[in-house]
Image (cartoon, rainbow, N blue to C red):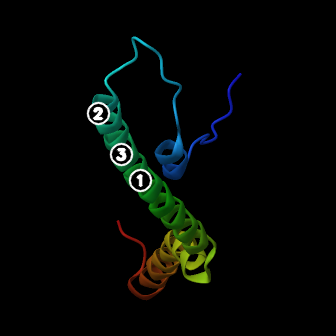
Amino acid sequence: MTENKIQLTPNDIVEKEFKRSMRGYNEEEVDEFLDKIIQDYEVFTKQIKQLQQENERLKRSLESPVSRQQQVAPQANYDVLKRLSNLEKAVFGPKE
């Protein structure tokens, strides 16, 4: 089973040297392709960092007192409506 761990950095890709052989690949073509990979890798790394920061921010906001108060609010609204209904019954009498 493979781990979900990044194994290469953009710098690892830049510094990678391949052995040469008689019938090797076109070096310029390989370099151009690796340049594209490096650019994509840098974008992915930035996106991952941004998403991790946003994830942490959202987790903190869920743990904040304001968030807990918002979770309690629907129950509080129900209680207020119930009290109001009981008050109306006491003042105006039961509906017939």
Mark 2 vs mark 3: in front: 2
Q: Position of residue 94 (x, y in %)?
A: 42, 73
Q: CA distance from mark 2 to mark 3?
A: 19 Å
Please indicate whether residue 65 sits to the left or right of residue 1 in the image. Answer: left
- Which residue is disc 2 drawn over? 28
Quarter in which the N terminus is drawn = top right
Q: Which residue is mark 1?
A: 42
Callout 2: 10 Å neighbours few (<14), some, many (20+)? few
Q: Amino acid at mark 1?
A: Glu
| Closer-to-camera residue (2/32) | 32
Mark 3–mark 1 distance (CA, rounded to whole Å): 5 Å
Residue type marked 3: Asp
Q: Earlier in the sequence, mark 2 or mark 3?
A: 2
Q: What kind of element bears circle 1?
A: helix
Number of residue marks: 3
Going by the numbered disc 2, the residue's amino acid type is Glu
Indicate which disc residue 40 carries.
Answer: 3
- Locate residue 43, reporting x and y percent: 37, 53
Tell me, yes or no, whether the two marked residues, 2 and 3, touch with CB atoms within 8 Å: no
